[in-house]
Image (cartoon, rainbow, N blue to C red):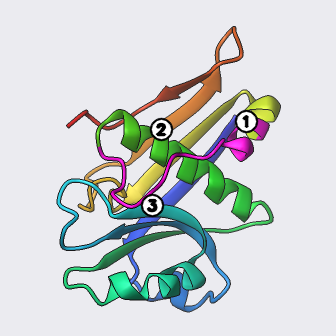
Amino acid sequence: MLEIEVHFENAYSAPTTIGDATHAVGVYSLWTKRSTIRPTYLGQGHLVDRLRAAKKVARAPGYMPLVAVVEGPDAKAIAEIVEHLLLHCAEAVGRYPLENGPRGTGSALEESLDAEAMVSITISGRDPLRGSRLTEAKVMGAWLDDDEDVVFSIPWQRL
């Protein structure tokens, strides 16, 4: 089983999260004033570059970027897996980000499932799909059933 732990924090209130790592890779959830029940955008990549690209959004009142740094040699693939599972969960519970297009193929997830049989992601800190602080960690997962179809466990309730 591939176990992943990510901790989301407000990029502005926790400057050491990305401030000390200009090349940090991770997952981010952008919230603006018009984002009341779902994030504006959810993505992954080099965090400093991604947050710079959101400058127009950053000037909006109420802008809050939540970030989770992913470290290690497989950071990019891990960030892709986390993003894919979060987008799947968001779609299933009616919290799909306002500005995201369709979900990608999830090739990093499929490769991990071929090698590991199950992926488990524990999320702590702030909730990337609600923006609020989590009182306890949320665990989401994916695995292959007998027909080789991907099955997801979703820790959020539908809107």
In the figure, residue 35 lies in which quadrant?
A: bottom left
Q: Position of residue 151 (x, y in %)?
A: 56, 23
Q: In the picture provided, is 100 more to the left or to the right than 78?
A: left
Instruction: Name the residue that disc number 2 marks.
Output: 140
State the residue at coordinates (82%, 33%). Answer: 115
Name the element at disc 2.
strand
Estimate the x, y position of residue 69 in percent, counting from the top left.
Answer: 56, 70
Disc 3/disc 1 C-alpha distance (Å): 20 Å
Q: Mark 1 or mark 2: which comes first in sequence?
A: 1
12 sits to left or right of 26:
left
Distance CA(mark 1)–CA(mark 2)? 16 Å
Q: Amino acid at mark 2?
A: Met
Kindly identify which numbered label has been placed on residue 110: 1
Q: CA distance from mark 3 to mark 2?
A: 16 Å
**Where 29 sits versus 11, above or below?**
above
> Would residue 80 be seen by someone viewing this image from the given angle?
yes
Can you say which quadrant of the picture contains the C terminus?
top left
Q: Looking at the picture, does residue 34 appear above or below residue 124?
A: below
The magenta stretch spans residue 4: no
Q: Residue at x 44, y 57 (%)?
A: 100
Tag 1 secondary structure: helix
For the question of whether residue 12 can be seen, the reply is no
Q: Which residues are magenta?
A: 95-111
Q: Quadrant of residue 73?
A: bottom right
Whether residue 145 sits left or right of residue 55 in the image: it is right
Q: Which residue shows up at 71% across the image and 63% down it?
A: 76
